[in-house]
Image: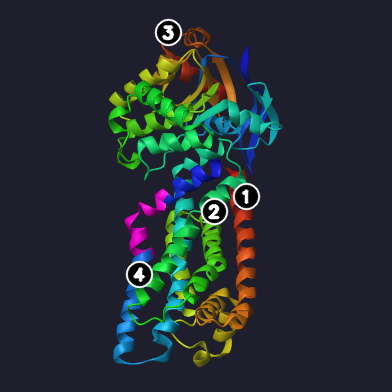
Amino acid sequence: MQAIRTIELVKRYKNLTAVDKLNLEIRQGELFSMLGVNGAGKTTTVKMLSCLTKPTDGDAIVGGHSIIKEPELVKRLIGVSPQETAVALNLSVEENLKLICGIHGFPKEKTKAKIRELSGQFDLGAVLQRKAGKLSGGFKRRVSIAMALISEPEILFLDEPTLGLDVIARHDLWDVIRSLKGKITIILTTHYMEEAENLSDRIGIMKEGRLLSVGTVEELNVAAGTNDFETAFVSIVKEAAV
Amino acid sequence: MRIITFAKRCAKEILRDPINLGFGLGFPLVLLLLLSSMQANIPVSLFEIDTLTPGITVFGLSFMTLFSATLIAKDRESALLQRLYATPLTGVDFILGYMLPILPIALGQTAICYLVAIPLGLTASVNIVYAIIGIIPMAIFNIALGLLCGSVFGVKQVGGICGALLTNLSAWLSGVWFDLNLVGGIFEKIAHALPFVHAVEMEKALFSGNFEAAALHFLPVILYSVVTTAAACFCFLGQMKKQ
């Protein structure tokens, strides 16, 4: 069953086509990575799918609802962890989590239970009372993802979740993301090949707004005639330029 | 529920910033004490405590513009708004959530100014309550102006425009520090075309119990308040769409 289907999705900014006639299908429950260099159109695609930006043309069906005609219904099904750390810096971790619970209209008991559940899942117990602005980059990202999960979304968008993190923090966050696999549909954007290779069920390679190739790591390696995913990525991207 | 949750968060962000508290509450009080001391040594009718205090309360509101503009600009730059735009919060939720928590802060600041002025010789009467209530339209104007600036400018620009330019404009064009008649000409005309001097005169009139005079200045203040709020909503919703 499909969680997301894009239909000739286009986003243009004046003279720049950020996303060009994107046709993509993402299955329910899979972790799908959009891989590409800077400016490939990954973040713009996520912004359109999460109803933050209106497409110039085309449409996408997210959880059975059109992002053009039913954005409010789409918003109820999704969670978004943006590229930059999107937390309220002067609020404690607990207050940040409570903020999102309140916005989603959770009663007190459910809020308490949710905070308990997420602080256990993301190992936030020790930092619950600390101001989010005082946390390390890795912990800020954890809080950011935990906030995106509060609404119990069917579909979670993680935009460059490990950007700027050190290697330990990155691996810790990978463990967190792996723990979510299979429970919900995850769309992850990254330009780290290692990240896409380690976490994804399938990968879509993007360049200059176009989707060049989609498949599992093995399928992409076979398509590029190599055993090494980085070589496969470079080959697919370079071939597209010819 | 959603609005209250978001408004609480905005209030916490403002009140936990020591610079906000220092400037917003401290600076008007310092001015009040300083000018009262000057008045004690060199009497100037403009700085008599019953005349000065209503003016200081209006001047203090310019910091509410800085608070709201800084909060919104910071939210926009930190991507927190991007996250919240993907939640069921609507445009109205955002606008009210940003504006509502600053209103009690503005009223609190005004009340503190009047309370501090009493031991300095301010005539204590029920009119203080009317003056505090009467400041609401001007407070809304200032908060909406902040919403407008925060929707259009970045954090650094907001600091310059709201922190320096607007506070100075509201000070010079309000008639608190000098008599506008003494300057006259185009300066006086510009001052009267803007809401600051009207807000000060309205406050003075309310404080002295002259409600007829207050009503005369009420219209331009409420007009600016409504127009600025509409413009702020337009700009905020516009940038929300652009996101």
Q: Position of residue A18 (x, y in %)?
A: 59, 35
Q: Which residue is mark 2?
A: B151
Q: Secondary structure at mark 1?
A: helix
Mark 2 falls within which chain?
Answer: B
Asked if disc 3 and disc 1 are in contact, CB closer than 8 Å, the reply is no
Same-chain status of marks 3 and 2: no
Q: Nearer the viewer, mark 4 or mark 3?
A: 4
The Cα–Cα distance between marks 3 and 2, rounded to whole angstroms, is: 50 Å
The Cα–Cα distance between marks 2 and 4, rounded to whole angstroms, is: 26 Å
Identified by mark 4, the residue type is: Phe
Residue A227 marker: 3
Residue drawn 45% across the image and 31% down it: A147
The Cα–Cα distance between marks 2 and 1, rounded to whole angstroms, is: 9 Å
Q: Which residue is mark 1?
A: B238
Q: Which residue is mark 4?
A: B27
Q: Nearer the viewer, mark 3 or mark 2?
A: 2
* Marks 4 and 1, the one that precedes in the sequence: 4
